[in-house]
Amino acid sequence: MVKSTSHLIKIKDIRDDVVITEDGGLRAILAVPGINFSLLSEQEKEAVVGLFKELLDGLDFNVQIFVVSRLAYIEGYVNYLKERLEQETEPLIKIQLEEYIKFIQDYIETHRIMKKLFYFVVPYETEVIKVGGVFKKEYKKEEEFYQQLEQLETRVIYITEKLSAIGLQPIRLKTPELIQLFYELYNPNPRWGMAPIKLFEELMQAIEE
């Protein structure tokens, strides 16, 4: 029997701004802006490296850093410029806008413009209990879930503070943003906007069944 593709997705649920894995682990995800390291002075570079080393040295848990490269589509920006062009009454500015729009359109036809998205995955593993001779991670009660969630939040705060000290301001992904992220990871198409939440909820239900 051919397996459903759902067995490849190790996510049980997404709720309360966390990803719950099939084995009961919790994952918070921080979106982190990039930094152009080459433009920093030597003193600034040393400071960044030192602070990042301090972050890593202070960890007593594993973290995952992953980078997503996407084609950058800027049709929205071009459309905005075209709207500005229609509203502009100054002849000289209209000419400049027309030339700028043409330049952008010509450029994107011959160049693949990529953007990189950086993410910090902060984990918390639930207690392993023995169920029917098999070791399994699960929540005994709903309040236990929130107790584990508090422990995860402590880790998120630590990572956030350390990254902020470097000059990076991480953004904690909320539930809808987590759904969007994973939907787009499994359905890579940068033209899509917000993921259909209903569809993803049905997918999660199918996984649990």
Image (spheres, grey):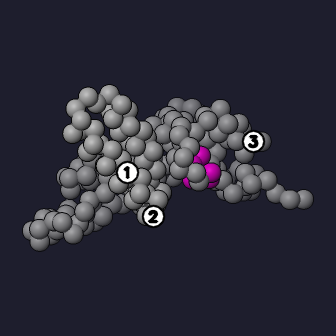
- Residue density around tag 3, few if under 14, some if 14–19, many if 20 or more, within 10 Å: few
Q: Secondary structure at mark 3?
A: helix
Magenta part, dominant SS: helix
* Mark 1–mark 3 distance (CA, rounded to whole Å): 48 Å
Asked if residue 150 shows in the view, the reply is no
Q: Residue at x 53, y 37 (%)?
A: 194
155 to 199, vertically: above or below: below
Q: Secondary structure at mark 1?
A: helix
Q: CA distance from mark 1 to mark 2?
A: 13 Å
Q: Is residue 24 above or below residue 133?
A: above
| Residue underneath mark 3 | 206
Mark 2 or mark 3, earlier in chain: 2
Task: Please give the name of the residue rendered at 36% of the width and 31% of the height, measured from the top-left corner.
Answer: 86
Classify 10 Å Cα crowding around label 1: few (below 14), some (14-19), many (20 and above): few
Which quadrant of the rendered structure holds the N terminus? bottom right
In the rendered picture of this protein, how many numbered marks are placed on residues? Answer: 3
Amino acid tagged 3: Ala
The residue that label 1 is drawn on is: 102
Amino acid type, mark 2:
Thr
Span of residues in magenta: 183-187
Q: As rendered, which of 29 and 23 lies closer to the eye? A: 29
Magenta region includes residue 111: no
Q: Nearer the viewer, mark 1 or mark 2?
A: 1
Work out which quarter of the rendered image holds the C terminus and state it: top right
For residue 63, side relative to residue 203 (left or right)? left
The residue indicated by pointer 2 is 110
Instruction: Identify the disc placed on residue 62.
Output: none
Residue 110 in percent (x, y) is at 45, 64
